[in-house]
Image (cartoon, rainbow, N blue to C red):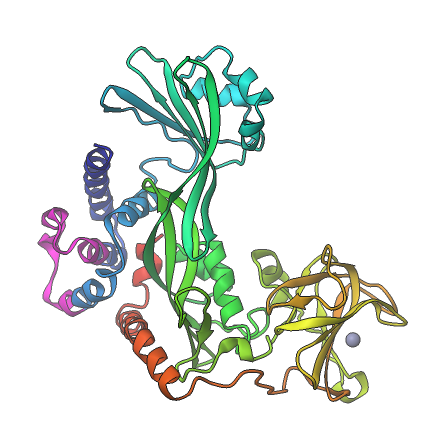
Amino acid sequence: MLMQISANRFIQSMREVVRKMQKRSKPIAKISLSILVVGLFAGAAAIATVSTEQNALVQPVQKLVVDVLTPPINFALAHEFVNDASNLTDVSESYDAIVPAHETYISETRVRSGDTLSSIMARLSLNEPGLIAFISQNKQALSAHKLYPGRSIVAALDHNGGMLWVRYYHTPGEEQQGVTVTRYLEIAKDATNDFEAREASETAETQTQVAVGTIESSLFAATDLAGVPDAITSQMAEVLGGKIDFLRDLRRGDQFRVIYETRTHLGRPAGSGRVLAVEFVNKGVPFTATWYSHNGQSGSYFDKNGQNMRGTFLRSAIKFSRVSSTFGMRNHPIHKEWRQHSGVDFAAPTGTPIMATADGTVDFIGWQNGYGKTIILRHNNKVTTLFAHQSRFAQGLKKGERVSQGDVIGYVGSTGWSTGAHLHYEMRVAGRPVNPLSASLPLAEPLKGSEQVAFLKAASSLHLQLEKLAALQEAVPDLMNVASR
Ligand SMILES: [Zn+2]
């Protein structure tokens, strides 16, 4: 039933999009959107509403879009896409649907900032004496005391408006041993008409999504335009961080193509998953990373030859984020004469997260004369890295503890002999300082023999998909930027 209503709404939405498209004066936008719509719905009934004005010139591109988009994009995601793209339905703020199913009425809302239990109950038309008192006293109902804005609350009512149950989806899209689950609190009436609370979980569905874009001003500006979630953008920068310093190396005209997972639960967004494959063309040079798991549980990113991306030190020790990306491209790092300095300085405001540039263990954490609050990481028996002038360390981090590449170990500051907030970063090989920006120190061997064959086999469809995206981007550079807005 729910699906059917979604389908009707979806087709209505599609018609609306097409109408809007036809009103637009910019021809490129019109063609792009038509192509995307056809691409999404090749084989679906909706195709009939949009396929009339294709011309011969557009056909090869259309074929490409169908090739690229058809396998990974499914109905639920397309539905979400249209909602986002056209703003026809406001699903992000609140969404109330009444769906009859076996005389059960389902209503749903989302937590807004400033909400209280009673304001939420009112929106759900839930008038249940004693419910709020029960929630505030019952130990099982603890998770209801943290109302995260954006999270979903669903109530089931009988035909008299009496409560059957109410669910608070407090933890959407959490990964547990390779499976994504959504956890929720359910409060229901038991046989004696008393309230009872329990924590429960359901498996979330995973969809695969693709996007391409071209850098005009910043990576986030480009990924925003392509509809890529922030969490995926950050992952892209992390995964390729050994090849590209995303705060310093980006140039206008750089391109990306990315294949990534999104999660839904009951047709609603439940967070981003993993980047499956990403290609980034920086200053004309393409860098590719593909997720590969040989046992289906743990995995890592590999380049096209099977070299583990984790085996390379990150080019920047400053965590890439929407915030850091706004100051990074202007003044990062501070340039100093390398020979006199024995380190690299990254300018960043106090409090900016600092991350481990490779897997390692904490060799030293504390105060060092001149360096102020300092961490030294040991990566193998030869290589160490040093992070100085920190304002504070990551909470609970201790000597001897293992850290992974990309883990936040501390925060930028100006402790010790420092004239302003910055990170002083050093790398030493057998005790001798080397320039971390030009050092090439692979920490892991590339995959070889049967392992490499297995990787290439597993990654081949993703590599092919990246190639198709590249061809598509070449054919219509503005396509996705326009279409997925
Ligand atoms: Zn320095």
| Residue drawn where x is 19% and y is 63% of the image | 66
> Which residue sits at x=44%, y=36%?
200
Looking at the rendering, the stretch of residues picked out in magenta corresponds to 34-60
As for residue 392 lying within the magenta part, the answer is no
Q: Above or below — where is 221 with respect to 423?
A: above
- Examine the structure image and report whether residue 38 is included in the region drawn in magenta: yes
480 or 393, nearer to the observer: 393
Quarter assignment of residue 359: bottom right
Quadrant of the rendering where the N terminus is positioned: top left
In the rendered image, is residue 217 in sight? no
Counting from the top left corner in percent of width and height, residue 136 is at 59, 21
Q: How many marks?
A: 0
Position of residue 477 measured from the top left corner of the image (x, y, whole percent):
32, 68
Determine the residue positioned at 12% across, 59% down.
Answer: 54
Q: Is residue 417 left or right of residue 33?
A: right
User: Where is residue 463 drawn, in percent x and y?
Assistant: 32, 75
Quick one: 268 or 227, which is closer to the camera?
268
Is 373 in front, or is 60?
373
Taking the image as shown, residue 280 lies to the left or right of residue 4, namely right
Vertical order, 212 against 154 (above or below): below
Q: Nearer the viewer, residue 217 or 384?
A: 384
**Residue at figure coordinates x 51%, y 12% from the top left:** 130
In this rendering, position of residue 436 left or right of residue 263: right
Quadrant location, ligand no. 1: bottom right
Q: Is residue 26 left or right of residue 443?
A: left
